[in-house]
Amino acid sequence: MKKLSYLVAGILVMLMLAACSSDSSANSEEDSGSSGENATSDTVETGAVETSVEATGDEDVMLDFWIHQTGEDETNAYIELIDAFNKEHDDIHVNAEVIIDDGASAYSDSINAALVAGNLPDVMAVDGPYVSSFAEAGVIQPIDDYVDEETKSQYVDSIIQQGTYNDKLYSLGAMEASVMLYYNKDLLDEAGIEPADSIEEAWTWDELMENSKKLTNEDRYGLNLFMNYGVGEWLTFMGAPLAWSNGGALISEDGTKVDGYLNSPETIEALNYVKELFAEGVVTDSPGEMQFEEGNAALALGGPWIAVSAEDAGLNWGMMPYPFKDEKVSPSGSMAYAVTNNTENPEAAVELMKWMTNEEATVKISKATGMPPAQKSAFDNMEKFNELPWSVMKEQVLETAHARPATPAYPVLTDAFAQSFHAAALGEDVESVVEQQVQRVERELKRFEE
């Protein structure tokens, strides 16, 4: 049995390492046009959600619900959904608390304090790739007893993949995320380069390299990888599909071994491809915050929030699928909801989770944040995802999305890959750096051996 002090320390390390992914920062970037890892705010607002439905005192169940969010429109969407839930359920009342992400550690600090005090809420938002760490630490509990196969089938596959650990389902999400290859239409037209309008037409690594070179000149870079987001979760979210597309991996399928996977020839080759992109000068490790939006990069591998910032900047932009080597794979994963082991009402807690991630909810949150919805039917009922450029995002989420590895050692694993990616960008010897990181992750994995 793990001692409480070990559990809390482990979670603290996990949350300190966590950056948004793509996902949690996705919402911040969605609204602010900057990376959630770098976005700043003068104040961090934390408070109870005010809804028009007050508890009567007659409810059988009272639920505490923590929501992580990064923008006013997103907050309003959550408030409306919770208000509707309280109106619909006479026997359950939800008391929600919204913790606004300041780009630093507000949400992490709240979870850490609650872990120490033993007063976690009934339901809380968690960053998708960290579900396995929370599950292993006993912070959240499986929900299979309350979610049938028909319900699970309504979600895009990557949501269930993200929320599953050791064959048990722990989380459900309302939004997905992805990384697309954005392009400046005017610059591609000038260069006579034809963009890809579907996954079938996706560029290969060679085409990305060749076209990035053509688009690079003394005034601009051919490609932006948003290295300004820092050495964190973004590099794993954006970069891991390069390894997967080449037949590589970050860790074994059962999540217990990295030697032979993170340092496999296929993964090393993918990182060396990254190294070559930087060596050829088509991308920089220190781009300006709005490099793509200001026309200083012709292409950009970015999340859904880049579509919003490019649109706001008045850029004539388009969206292409993630480039591939052998297999067409794209990133996935975002914030989701999980039931903590603190709750005395798991069935009611899951009822709330399903409400917050049903078709109506996913459409509402997608409209508020720009993120792709987590329900398959929501895609069909949102016209923009059936037309270019947004149809590219839909295709990826439904057909090529790949969740990050489920392992309790994920916080160390993701940092190891991010450090390796960054080393490649700096032109360092990839193999030696990766070997050092493999030893580090293997040591961490031993902590979870029975």
Image: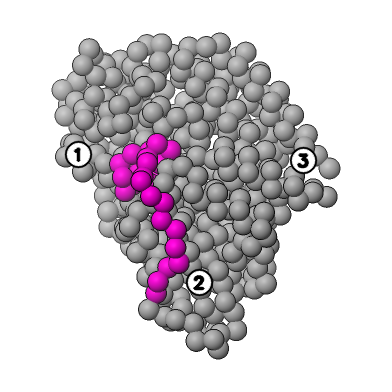
Label 3 sits on residue:
448
Helix, strand, or loop for circle 1? loop
Q: For residue 337: magenta?
A: no
Give the camera-side residue of 27 and 176. 27
**Residue 26, horizontal then vertical, whole percent:** 40, 45
Farthest residue in the front direction? 42
The answer to whether one can see residue 429 in this image is: yes
Helix, strand, or loop for circle 3? loop
Residue at 44%, 63% (x, y): give it.
Answer: 47
Q: For residue 35: magenta?
A: yes
Label 1 sits on residue:
313
In this view, 20 is above or below 47: above
Residue 404 relative to residue 294: left or right: right
| Quarter of the C terminus within the rendering | top right
**Residue 400, horizontal then vertical, whole percent:** 47, 42
| Tag 3 near tag 1, CB within 8 Å | no
Label 2 sits on residue:
95
Q: Give the image's coloring scheme.
A: one colour
User: Which residue type does callout 3 highlight?
Assistant: Phe
Residue at 37%, 61% (x, y): give it.
Answer: 75
User: Which residue type does callout 1 highlight?
Assistant: Ala
In the image, the segment drawn in magenta is 26-51
Residue 24 relative to residue 108: left or right: left
Q: CA distance from mark 2 to mark 1?
A: 38 Å
Q: Quadrant of residue 313?
A: top left
Q: Earlier in the sequence, mark 2 or mark 1?
A: 2
Q: CA distance from mark 3 to mark 2?
A: 35 Å
Helix, strand, or loop for circle 2? strand
User: Which residue type does callout 2 highlight?
Assistant: Asn
Label 3 crowding class (10 Å Cα cut-off): few <14, some 14-19, many 20+? Answer: few
The answer to whether one can see residue 357 in this image is: no
